[in-house]
Image: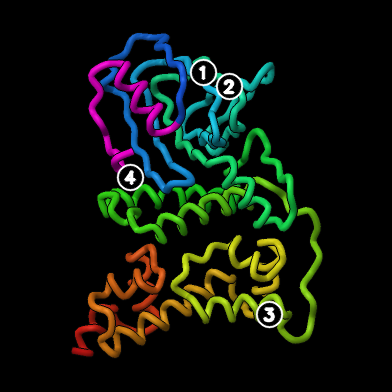
Amino acid sequence: MEHLLQSAPTFDDWEGVHDAVADAYFPHDMKPRSGGPASHCGLEVVDLSVCRLAHMRFGATVDIVTEHPGAFAINIQLEGSMESRLGSDSFTTTPGEAMVFPADTPARMPEWPADRAVLGLRIDSDYLSREAERVFARKHVQLPRVIDLRGAEGAAWLTLARTTFDNARQAGGSLYTREQVAESVASMLVTGLLLTAVPEEDSATCPTGMRPRPIRRVMDAIEHDPARPWAPADLAEVAGVSVRRLQQCFREHVGLTPLAYLHDVRLERVHDDLVHGRGGSVTDVAVRWGVTHLGRFAAAYRSRYGRLPSQTLAASS
């Protein structure tokens, strides 16, 4: 795609709708089943390379058939209910539930109503398999056909997905042209989805006493390169344990999650550069140290240091 964010495109006919959705999400066959102008369709997409987020609404009831070639589709129901079919199996999702469509598998949505909005996450199948193995430290992880996002963990993940759209709108899509930002956001989305969808296999606790060696390895890796777009799966790979186990151990021995610890280290590095007037503008310094959400960063910086990052930089000049 040429643009990372397509916002409210104008459609003149159903052929244009079909082509836009096929380009943004998946190749498919689409048949309008009720009257309605193509101009009432809506499509937004954020392209993060290995995955894409697409917000879709059609101006009429449509019948869609696809095999989701090369990638999984996670269709999150935002309004009403919708039937989805995989082979001879039929599933109905309601708001707060997500339908999982495996890659290269015939699927059909026989009646996508005109008033139903869906937030879709497309994930390259090889990337999903690789990330699942890193997140859970085991192979052959299977996603359920329907994911319940109505609990606290699922709701938090859905907020992350929506925030990705908000950031893209505010920055006009330019934020995600930075490779490390796109990579980091993609990994957070996929890791968060996996942790929400797949239950933990056991509840073993962390070793007691001194900080376990896996934690020390992760802390050393973060201190050595905090600017790297670390994702939970990356840190778990350094530790040699699953993401859930690493999070549990960090809470018990550090009092923070691994990503919270990473956030603190980045704040310290940014603060040091701003105090000494190194690195240009606040945005340049923050992005260089791996910050991807400038609004939350500014609030966290002020909470810790008592003033805005821009005020620190101004005082150094």
Residue 107, numbered circle: 2
Q: CA distance from mark 4 to mark 2?
A: 27 Å
Give left or right: position of 202 versus 308: right
Q: CA distance from mark 3 to mark 4?
A: 40 Å
Picture coordinates of residue 227, whole percent (x, y): 44, 72
Q: CA distance from mark 1 to mark 2?
A: 6 Å
Q: What residue is at 74 percent from the left and 86 percent from the top?
A: 210
Q: Nearer the viewer, mark 1 or mark 3?
A: 1
Which residue position is annotated with label 4? 4
Q: Nearer the viewer, residue 51 or 93?
A: 51
Residue 65, numbered circle: 1
Amino acid, disc 3: His
Magenta segment boundaries in residue numbering: 1-25
Q: Earlier in the sequence, mark 4 or mark 1?
A: 4
Residue 216, numbered circle: none
> Quick one: label 2, few (<14), some, or many (20+) residues within 10 Å?
many
Give the SS element for disc 2: strand
Residue 253, numbered circle: 3
Q: CA distance from mark 3 to mark 2?
A: 46 Å
Picture coordinates of residue 217, whole percent (x, y): 65, 78
**Residue 148 position (above or below residue 185):** above
> Quick one: label 4, few (<14), some, or many (20+) residues within 10 Å?
many
Q: What residue is at 47 percent from the left and 79 percent from the top?
A: 265
The reply to whether the magenta stretch includes residue 13 is yes
Amino acid, disc 1: Val
Quadrant of the rendering where the C terminus is positioned:
bottom left
